[in-house]
Amino acid sequence: MVTHFIFMSSSYSLRTRIALDFIVDGEGIQDELMNKLDRIMQECGHDVSISTHRIQAKDDSWQSVCEADQYFMDVKVVKDVDEFINLIQKDRELQGIDVAKYILSHVKCTQLKLQKLVYLCYADYLCSTGKALFIDDIYAFKYGPVVDTVYEKYKQYGYKPIEKESENIDSKNISEMPSKSRILFAKDGLEKVKSIDKTLKKYSDLTASQLVEITHREKSPWSMTYKGIWVIKQKLRDDVIKEFHGYESVD
């Protein structure tokens, strides 16, 4: 019999669980495994979801692990710690589209309203924590702040309400789960979900036009950035959002 020691996590980009498999075959392996786990936690964040497993199998193959316990079926086994860390780190950063999907699981939105809510979630989180909610840049367009990736994803709807991607799911709680899990897996995920929920509680009942009025207020970050339709890629900088987001408050 062979002893396998396994680190497991999830990859949202690959849409599967991932595993790092070690054979326990000598003295000193326990210290080596702890050092590897410490490195994973240091580089990926101490709030990352990592499980550890010790399995007795007939040989050193992954197939023998699956035969010993079917829990490990359909798991992607990666080659080394670096690959394992890289896959986790990729999913620890949120994109604007991740936040947009979570918002859509709560709120019926047009593309315009969605853009404003994504921006306001970003601005609220930035001002309360000093950290970015997602990695995308935000730009000042004619009708307010815009995240390019969210616009490209949903521009086909124009002024019509955006349809949910999973039309066969009727339960709000079930349709929320994938998008919420995606955010929770990110760095500071619970903190980010709480902040987004707080922002939606403030702004989600407002119409797209009302949200545009808020982001267009005098001295808002948008008004301090926008130079007209003839100037492209007018980026809303974080320092400007921090200084002037207070003018967008509805509290």
Image (spheres, grey):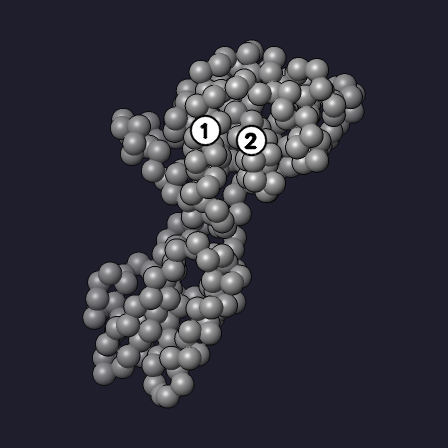
Q: Check disc 2: other Cα within 10 Å, few if <14, some if 14-19, many if 20+.
A: many
Mark 1 or mark 2, which has the lower sequence index?
Answer: 2
Counting from the top left corner in percent of width and height, residue 43 is at 53, 61
User: Is residue 92 or residue 34 the one in the foreground?
Assistant: 34
Up/down of 243 relative to 10, above or below: above
Up/down of 15 relative to 78, above or below: above
User: Residue 242: which quarter of the image?
Assistant: top right
Residue occupied by mark 1: 198
Residue occupied by mark 2: 124
The residue at 56%/40% (across/down) is 129
Q: Left or right of 235: which side holds 70?
A: left
Q: Given contact means CB atoms under 8 Å apart, are the residues at marks 1 and 2 in contact?
A: yes
Q: Amino acid at mark 1?
A: Lys
Q: Residue furthest front?
A: 251
Counting from the top left corner in percent of width and height, residue 47 is at 44, 54
Q: Left or right of 72: which side holds 198?
A: right
Q: Amino acid at mark 2?
A: Asp
The residue at 48%/39% (across/down) is 192
